[in-house]
């Protein structure tokens, strides 16, 4: 089946083109042309056609967690995510026991292996291990009972269970053995990310020198920027070739701080993420995330204390499409830049840009289409409309 999409703008690898037509045939991209091709045309007047959004840090969605160890729940989250504008995601684990992390990796792999070509949900671009190699000083909503030192042999067991799908692993830069772990994973082609860390600037820089290339949800869960102690945040801002995740819900990080990071580092190396938990896409109420009780209210997820009061922020309930709109509404970047940050830049940061993040002939036709006001208009996965 061949058809073409007509819209006001197309965000293509070389430039954003005004008007024209993008052909899709048998689920893969053809080429963009200024003239209408001889096939059916689907029109999106006033809209911007973008590559499918890539969320590289997300723990769950639609009342399912990535650590449910249930392939069916991964599939349901994937379908709901595609309907919300995300076409590729890295299911992200928590700090749990090594055995539970292994089971979660195996379940994610099983979900991916069983998918048919016409599966109507977001693709699994890989797995992100957020933990358990963190410091208790910035443990956040991770379970401190399972914090351990970086261990390549343990990672190898997880990678075997995942069928080679682990693309990214986070750790605190100051942990004993961090540099060796980082170097070993870099040699395996796996991204290492500095997060939940109380490292000094020098310790963070040593991790970057060993091969770390990403910073986990910059500002959150790390030693912050101080003029006599630049910390992890300062290292994120001053290492130009690394990538800095940033939660763009306006609550974890206020817009002015997002702007400070983007201005310091450049939008080409800032990665908008959701860090979304199980309650994303769900009504307000109580849930369990990473084995810890949480409550969602006011568009945010909080840890739930034993006395029923709310504690610290546990994570977001953001969708990446809304995050893209936020960055434009806050006037931090242009619409073109915001889209590229959530597609091309995100894919590069996880080293999966060979399969997603750009509209290129021959690739799977995954698209996120935005209205003129940057609200979500439609999502296509493999050339099939899902929203």
Image (cartoon, rainbow, N blue to C red):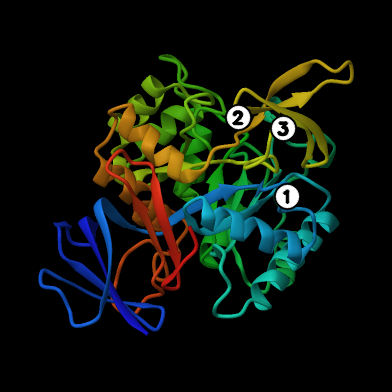
Q: Secondary structure at mark 2?
A: loop
Query: Quadrant of the rendered structure where residue 166 is?
Result: bottom right
User: In the picture provided, is 129 more to the left or to the right than 7?
Assistant: right
**Coordinates of residue 338 in the picture (x, y in percent):** 32, 43
Q: Which element is circle 3 on?
A: loop
Residue indicated by mark 2 = 221
- Residue 191 in view of the camera: no
Residue drawn 73% across the image and 50% down it: 64
Kindly report which numbered mark, 3 or 1, lies closer to the viewer in this rendering.
Answer: 1
Residue designated by label 1: 65
Quickly name the residue at label 3.
141
Image position, residue 74 (x, y; %): 69, 60
- Residue at (19% x, 83% y) in the render: 38
Q: CA distance from mark 3 to mark 1?
A: 14 Å
| Residue 206 in view, yes or no | yes
Mark 2 to mark 3 CA distance (whole Å): 9 Å
Question: x%, y% of residue 58?
Answer: 60, 47
The circle on residue 383 is none
Task: Judge left or right: residue 336 versus residue 67.
Answer: left
**Which quarter of the rendering shows the N terminus?**
bottom left
Q: Earlier in the sequence, mark 2 or mark 3?
A: 3
Question: Is 59 placed above or below 363 here?
Answer: above
Q: Are marks 3 and 1 in contact (CB under 8 Å)?
A: no
Kindly check if marks 2 and 1 are in contact, taking CB atoms under 8 A apart as contact: no
């Amino acid at each position: 089946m061949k058809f073409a999409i007509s819209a006001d703008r197309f965000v293509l690898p070389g430039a954003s083109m005004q008007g024209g037509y993008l052909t899709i045939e048998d689920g893969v991209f053809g080429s963009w042309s200024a003239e209408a091709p001889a096939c059916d045309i689907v029109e999106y007047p006033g809209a911007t056609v973008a590559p499918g959004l890539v969320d590289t840090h997300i723990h769950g969605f639609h009342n399912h967690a990535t650590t449910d160890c249930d392939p069916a729940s991964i599939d349901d989250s994937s379908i709901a995510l595609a309907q919300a504008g995300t076409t590729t995601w890295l299911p992200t684990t928590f700090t749990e026991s090594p055995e539970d992390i292994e089971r979660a990796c195996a379940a994610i792999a099983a979900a991916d292996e069983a998918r048919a070509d016409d599966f109507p949900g977001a693709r699994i671009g890989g797995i992100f291990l957020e933990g358990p190699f963190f410091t208790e000083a910035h443990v956040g909503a991770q379970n401190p009972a399972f914090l351990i030192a970086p261990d390549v042999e343990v990672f190898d067991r997880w990678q075997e269970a995942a069928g080679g799908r682990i693309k990214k692993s986070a750790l605190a830069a100051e942990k004993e053995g961090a540099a060796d772990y980082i170097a070993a994973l870099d040699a395996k082609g796996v991204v290492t990310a500095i997060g939940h860390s109380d490292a000094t600037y020098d310790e963070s820089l040593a991790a970057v020198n060993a091969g770390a290339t990403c910073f986990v949800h910059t500002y959150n869960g790390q030693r912050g920027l101080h003029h006599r102690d630049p910390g992890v945040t300062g290292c994120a801002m001053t290492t130009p070739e690394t990538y800095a995740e940033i939660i763009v819900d306006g609550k974890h990080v206020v817009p002015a701080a997002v702007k400070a990071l983007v201005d310091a580092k450049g939008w080409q190396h800032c990665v908008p993420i959701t860090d979304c938990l199980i309650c994303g896409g769900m009504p307000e109420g109580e849930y369990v995330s990473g084995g810890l009780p949480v409550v969602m209210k006011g568009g945010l997820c909080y840890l739930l204390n034993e006395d029923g009061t709310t504690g610290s922020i546990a994570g977001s309930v953001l969708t990446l499409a809304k995050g893209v709109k936020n960055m434009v509404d806050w006037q931090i970047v242009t619409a073109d830049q915001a889209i590229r940050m959530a597609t091309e830049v995100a894919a590069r940061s996880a080293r999966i840009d060979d399969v997603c993040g750009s509209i290129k002939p021959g690739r799977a036709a995954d698209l996120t289409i935005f209205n003129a006001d940057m609200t979500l208009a439609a999502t296509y996965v493999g050339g099939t409309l899902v929203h």
